[in-house]
Image (cartoon, rainbow, N blue to C red):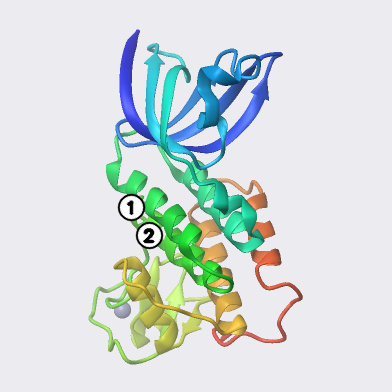
Amino acid sequence: MSTVATDAIVLHSFDYLESSRILRLVTREAGVRSVLARGARKSKKRFGAALDLYAEGTAELQMKTGRDLDTLASFDVTHARPTLAGDLSRFTGASMIAELTLRFARDAVDPGLFDAVGSTLDQLMATSGDRARDTAIAGAWRVLSELGIAPTIDTCAECHAALDPAAAAIFSHPAGGALCSRCGHLARGGRTLPAAARDALRDWLAVVDHPVSDPNDIRAHQRLLREFLREHLADEKPMPAFETWERDTLGARAPSASLNGAR
Ligand SMILES: [Zn+2]
């Protein structure tokens, strides 16, 4: 058995047997881990706020070779994020980020992923009203980028030719990003990505703030993200948090979307 002390954020938590809880953590030193918090429901003193969603702190994990479930020896919370639960768009955005991280992440050491998740949650906490939507979208692309599956924006995903940054481009999920006009003609089922949407994606992937507020643009970006995730997930399992976030952030369905351009 080895013991590892690492920065960690709680992304998921559920009851286990009569007195314990199982947490899923994204950690700086050990990737995504499932941990058993033994006796956590019997004694609030033992783990305190560590069982709260999105709490961050130093976790001491006891790992056994060949076992998927670690034991949580202690968790000192340095940064609780209670206000995430106080606003629907912030909360559903945070849930979507957590789901995406848990679905894609591995148990490899990945400090960049840890920082991307933590800073997205902090940005969501600091948002007001409508900015929670594009903040969550930007955070999702940043997380995907840290996982090594970011789309190409300024070079053709097929032939690597440079693309005019000011022009619309065909975006192909199977190809993994924007295409030049020659490859775009050959690709099936691509979407036209307007220059403004490419600008937003470029900035988000570079961790540059880029507000998008128009509900139709938000919806189009959510759909692009959903299709991209579907293309990269190995299974067809539902993404309930994503679906709730997509449905709830904008309320009733908007009439049309500007990156709608199925050709
Ligand atoms: Zn090309």
Q: Residue at x 30, y 40 (%)?
A: 110
Furthest toward the bottom, the residue is 167
For mark 2, give the secondary structure.
helix
Whole-percent x and y of residue 259? 54, 84
Residue nearer the viewer, 200 or 89: 89
> Which residue has dot 1 on it?
146
Residue 142 is tagged as: 2
Name the amino acid, label 2: Arg
Q: State yes or no: Cβ of the residue under disc 1 lies below 8 Å from any atom of ligand 1.
A: no
| Picture quadrant of ligand 1 | bottom left
Residue in the image at 35% along x and 58% along y: 145
Q: Which one is in front, 11 or 55? A: 55
- Residue 120 image point, x, y percent: 42, 56
- Residue drawn 72% across the image and 86% down it: 255
Q: Is residue 262 visible?
A: no
Q: Is residue 155 left or right of residue 215?
A: left
Task: Say if mark 2 contacts mark 1, CB within 8 Å.
Answer: yes
Where is 61 relative to 23, above or below?
above
Q: Secondary structure at mark 1?
A: helix
